[in-house]
């Protein structure tokens, strides 16, 4: 793979290749599930595509219907096999988003707010050694594997540690890389419209991968997968395979079956996504390796992930699909709803409050089957609380041990917004600056 020296040249070439191949037939828009749920439905399929391609080619604003289509894209990928010319329309819409954000970003300072939110949420859930494992860059050495967490998965650290428990049990030689300092670059490039900044993030992170001389980088985050493999797939030189961690685990299913000595007697429904279907299929196969576990149904959602980059782009469709999932869990009288990614777990963890079923990540089940105690899901514990004062009280020891001295009243006020990842909706102004520290008690208090 040849390296690109300038991201603007790279993006220009990628857009040119798309425009040369696209015939504006509209087949991609015809199969798009989000079109009926936005202003995009007011235009025909050909008109939608022409509005996007004209904007890409002429660097002009899109018509309202085409803009609604682009902004509502949940990454489902249904358009990819529909294209008769072999264009990746999901990639085309991502490039349109990049251009629109460069003109005017709806999420200014997103990376700053996101980074502060991630670090705060992690500091509320894990002890200092774990915090450093996820957020500090490891000492450079040769390692066969780099386990790449991405940024936002650090908000739900328990599932990352569950993966590491299994990697350790299988004897993997790996280092962990992730957090905002190793961002894939998608935030600056796609959301903030700062392509040069995003290109530097991408280049720096790929350089960090290469520094370990790995044969494989095992990725967790679906957004990192789409950005690094699709949007930026040819941007910089790589000397490793970039796979999802479930690819590697499934390739060792015989070893996992020997490791899985503890029956997990549960009937479960798996939540998965059409946008990256191979990950859902991998998890299905891994769950079927667990003794005692019965996978009664996999419910597919159209997007490629839950959260700000995926299903939240089209809230009306998201609500329909999420309601359907919960209905299927109840219909089966399942013991647990099993989530796929960190965004999925954050979206559904609160449903355990009703007491009808557990909400578990598939990594919880892998660890349990291997006879290990899954890492404490502190995120879910907080989501199940009714009062934020109780959450602040429970989080205080974690914060203090991690050296985070934060005002409790401030955290109680802004915690719900932080835990809802509001920065991806243009919110979280409270983290545009550093959060306030606790006030020292006055004399005599």
Image: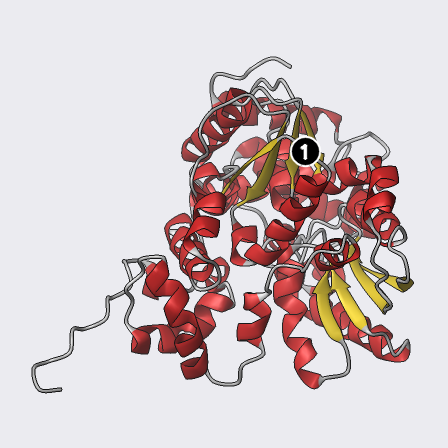
Please determine whether, in this image, residue 84 is positioned above or below residue 353. Answer: above
Tell me the crowding category of disc 1: few under 14, some 14 to 19, or many 20 or more residues within 10 angstroms, Cα based.
Answer: few
Q: Which residue is mark 1?
A: 172
Left or right of 389? Residue 175 is right
Left or right of 280? Residue 414 is left
Figure quadrant of the C terminus:
bottom left
Q: Which residue is rendered at x = 46% and y = 33% of the image?
A: 138
Write down the quadrant of residue 357 in the picture.
Answer: bottom right
Residue 159, percent from left and from top: 63, 55
Residue 340, percent from left and from top: 72, 56
From this viewpoint, which residue is outermost toward the left? 443
User: Which type of secondary structure does the marked residue at label 1 adopt?
Assistant: loop
Left or right of 78? Residue 2 is left
Write down the quadrant of residue 181 in the picture.
Answer: top left
| Front-lying residue, 263 or 247 | 263
| Front-lying residue, 25 or 95 | 95
Task: Specify whether residue 216 is in view.
Answer: yes
Residue 91, percent from left and from top: 67, 37
Figure quadrant of the N terminus:
top right
Please determine whether, in this image, residue 292 is positioned above or below residue 444. Answer: above
| Front-lying residue, 232 or 123 | 123
Q: Which residue is rendered at x = 49% and y = 46% of the image?
A: 134
| Front-lying residue, 134 or 6 | 134
């Amino acid at each position: 793979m040849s390296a690109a020296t300038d991201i603007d040249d790279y993006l220009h070439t990628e857009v040119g290749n798309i425009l040369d191949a696209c015939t504006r037939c509209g087949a991609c828009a015809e199969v798009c599930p989000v079109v009926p749920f936005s202003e995009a439905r007011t235009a025909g399929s050909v008109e939608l595509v022409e509005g996007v391609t004209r904007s890409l080619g002429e660097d002009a604003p899109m018509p309202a219907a085409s803009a609604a289509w682009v902004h509502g894209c949940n990454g489902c990928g249904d358009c990819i096999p529909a294209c008769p010319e072999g264009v990746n329309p999901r990639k085309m819409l991502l490039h349109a988003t990049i251009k629109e954000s460069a003109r005017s970003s709806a999420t200014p300072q997103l990376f700053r707010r996101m980074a502060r939110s991630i670090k705060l949420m992690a500091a509320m859930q894990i002890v200092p050694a774990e915090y450093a494992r996820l957020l500090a860059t490891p000492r450079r050495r040769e390692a066969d594997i780099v386990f790449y967490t991405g940024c936002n998965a650090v908000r739900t650290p328990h599932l990352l540690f569950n993966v590491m428990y299994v990697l350790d049990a299988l004897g993997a030689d790996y280092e962990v890389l992730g957090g905002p300092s190793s961002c894939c670059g998608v935030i600056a490039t796609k959301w903030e419209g700062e392509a040069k900044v995003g290109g530097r993030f991408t280049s720096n992170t790929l350089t960090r991968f290469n520094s370990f001389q790995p044969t494989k980088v095992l990725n967790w985050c679906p957004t990192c997968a789409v950005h690094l493999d699709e949007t930026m797939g040819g941007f910089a030189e790589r000397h490793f395979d970039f796979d999802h961690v479930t690819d590697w685990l499934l390739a060792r299913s015989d070893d996992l079956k020997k490791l899985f000595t503890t029956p997990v007697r549960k009937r479960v429904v798996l939540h998965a996504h059409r946008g990256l279907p191979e990950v859902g299929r991998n998890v299905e196969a891994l769950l079927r390796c667990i003794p005692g576990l019965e996978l009664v149904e996999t419910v597919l959602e159209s997007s490629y992930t839950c959260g700000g980059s995926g299903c939240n782009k089209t809230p009306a469709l998201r609500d329909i699909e999420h309601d359907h999932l919960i209905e299927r869990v109840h219909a089966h009288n399942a013991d647990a709803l099993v989530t796929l990614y960190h965004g999925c777990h954050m979206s559904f963890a609160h449903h355990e409050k009703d007491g009808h079923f557990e909400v578990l990540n598939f990594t919880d089940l892998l660890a349990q089957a291997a006879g290990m105690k899954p890492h404490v899901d502190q995120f879910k514990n907080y989501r199940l609380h009714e009062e934020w004062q109780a959450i602040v009280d429970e989080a205080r020891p974690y914060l203090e041990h991690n050296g985070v001295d934060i005002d409790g009243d401030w955290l109680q006020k802004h915690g719900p917004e932080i835990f809802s990842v509001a920065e991806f909706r243009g919110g979280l102004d409270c983290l545009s600056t550093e959060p306030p520290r606790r006030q020292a008690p006055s004399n005599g208090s």
